[in-house]
Amino acid sequence: MLSRMLRLAVSTLGLAFLVWSGTAGADQRFILDSHIHAGHDNDWVQRLVSIYREHNAMACVLTWMDDFELIKKAAEDYPDVVIPYGRVDPDDPNAVREIEKFYQAGFVGIKFHSPEKNWDDPSYFQMYRLCEYLGLPMLFHTGITSRGMTDKPAKSSTMRMRPGYLDLVARAFPRTMIQGAHFGNPFYDEAAEACRWNPNLFFDITGSTLHKLIKLDDLARFKKILWWSAGEGEETAHTLKGGPDAFEHIVFGTDEQPEGLIGNIERFQKFLDANEVPERLRAKMWGLTIARILDIDPETHQFRRPRPLPPGSHHIFEPGKPGGASDY
Ligand SMILES: [Zn+2]
């Protein structure tokens, strides 16, 4: 009798678990935050993990070498949430060596900010080629950059980081993903047109843009600049043949503290609705595009191939079919 009751209890619990986990999977879309900056202590990691797990979300965590150990351990302990990216100063003569160290430790992308020269300056090409060879997507700050209330001189400038400079970077390094941050704010047209012929160029739309356009009631302006659709290249000579829809060049990100995830989800949803983005593109923008490029299974949140990848083995397109990215 006791054992029968026990069996019943166990099977009821099992059923309840199945229903719960089934519901969690079915209801919750997969989210990949392509842009969040690492905090500096374990408390930050715990906040990230608990908030992002609640939303079936993973995060590309941009990490200076100072926080290398913290985020390396976080990625080992919480691989279902933490996708480690390194961050280097592009003008630091040690940048290439730091990229190598990040790569060897299993970091899977690199963030750059505040260059002294324009993003397409050839003196950076050695660094970009290393990232391409090691299969590391590159995330570039683009557009307006913040400045604190300080009298300390700085050499950072919005104009060194115009999104149009990524056009050359994307063409010169076609085997990896190039992501511009903040959709080039305020150079939106330039960012959009740079995407049109570059299937490996993407932008997140983090920062002040969605705040600004919600405040100005002007969110729908993006459908005027992201105007082309997949398949048009078959009919006209003015759109990339085999290329993706315009809106597929946008990927979700937050660029805030972990608690900012919820507000960012709400604003991104408003952005999708205001621009009448087709349903078939939305899951890609929320996370599937980057998951595919990073080789992450959105069901299990695991890398399909162990990291680090063998050098030269990562490619964003089918070999032999450059530009043939029909599943973007
Ligand atoms: Zn950022």
Image (cartoon, rainbow, N blue to C red):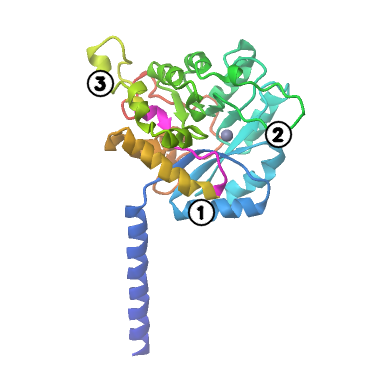
Q: Alpha-carbon neighbours of circle 2 within 10 Å: few (<14), some, or many (≥20)?
A: few
- Would residue 43 be visible to someone looking at this image? yes
Q: Which residue is mark 2?
A: 149
Name the residue rendered at 32%, 69% in the picture: 15
Quarter where residue 24 is shown: bottom left
Furthest-top residue in this view: 237
Kind of residue sitting beneath label 3: Gly
Which quadrant of the view contains residue 267?
Answer: top left
Give the residue pinned by disc 3.
Answer: 231
Q: CA distance from mark 2 to mark 3?
A: 49 Å
Q: Tell me if label 1 and label 3 are in contact, CB under 8 Å.
A: no
Image: 89 above or below 306 = above
Secondary structure of the residue carrying numbered label 3: loop
Secondary structure beneath dot 2 equals loop
Q: On the rendered structure, is 47 left or right of 320?
A: right
Q: Are marks 2 and 1 in contact (CB under 8 Å)?
A: no
Q: Amino acid at mark 2?
A: Met
**Disc on the earlier residue, 2 or 3:** 2
Residue range corresponding to the magenta coloring: 247-258
